Structure formats: structure tokens, C-alpha cells
Amino acid sequence: MKAYPYMHKHPTSGQTEIAAGMDLRDWFAGMALQGLLASDIEDTIDVFTSKSYELADLMMKQRKEVPNE
């Protein structure tokens, strides 16, 4: 699943194109990383990025389990 798809005009051809956007999992990981970096936890960036994707995977799993309302 993608986050933030958008339309834009190609810079040279002028044709309208649709860009899929970034993966929703990557967006979730970025949001989790932002929160982890703002916390008082002191750790290495490798641990933060690993934890970010663990949290993103949990969020993706939760989306599948909870029906849209």
C-alpha cells in the first residue's frame, strides 16, 4: 500500500504523470523513528531504525486485523 500518491507534470514533456508515493510501511517507520529520536532513550541509530521498522510492521499488521470503519 502506498502513502501520498500524487499527480505532477513531467518537467520536459509536460505530460501529467501519476506517482505512486512512498510505501505506507516506510511512512509508518519514519513516524516511529521521529518519536524514538525525540524520546529520552539513548541508543544507536541502528537500534532506532530497527525498532522503527518493527513498530511499522506492527502497525501494518494492526491495519489488516481491524476493519475500516
Image: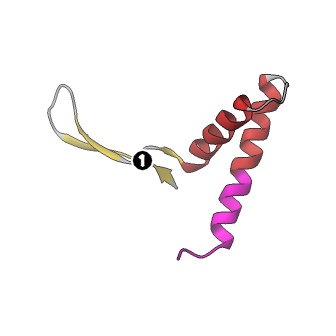
Image vertical order of residue 54 relative to residue 13, above or below? below
Q: What element carries label 1?
A: loop
The residue where tag 1 is placed is: 4
Q: Which residue appears at 83% of the width and 22% of the height?
A: 44
Q: Which residue appears at 25% of the width and 43% of the height?
A: 17
Q: Which residue appears at 80% of the width and 26% of the height?
A: 46
Image vertical order of residue 55 relative to residue 8, above or below? below
Is residue 63 on the magenta stretch? yes
Percent position (x, y) of residue 28?
Answer: 61, 46
Is residue 49 on the magenta stretch? no
Along the line of sight, which residue is nearer the eye, 27 or 19?
27
Image vertical order of residue 58 relative to residue 11, above or below? below
Q: Bin the neighbour count of mark 1 within 10 Å (Cα to Cα): few under 14, some 14-19, many 20 and up.
A: few
Q: Is residue 5 left or right of residue 39?
A: left
Q: Which amino acid does label 1 sit on?
A: Tyr
Q: What stretch is highlighted in magenta?
A: 57-69
Dominant secondary structure of the residues highlighted in magenta in the image: helix
Q: Which residue lies furthest to the left in this view?
A: 14
Q: Which residue lies furthest to the front in this view?
A: 40
Q: Is residue 32 left or right of residue 24?
A: right
Percent position (x, y) of residue 19?
Answer: 35, 43
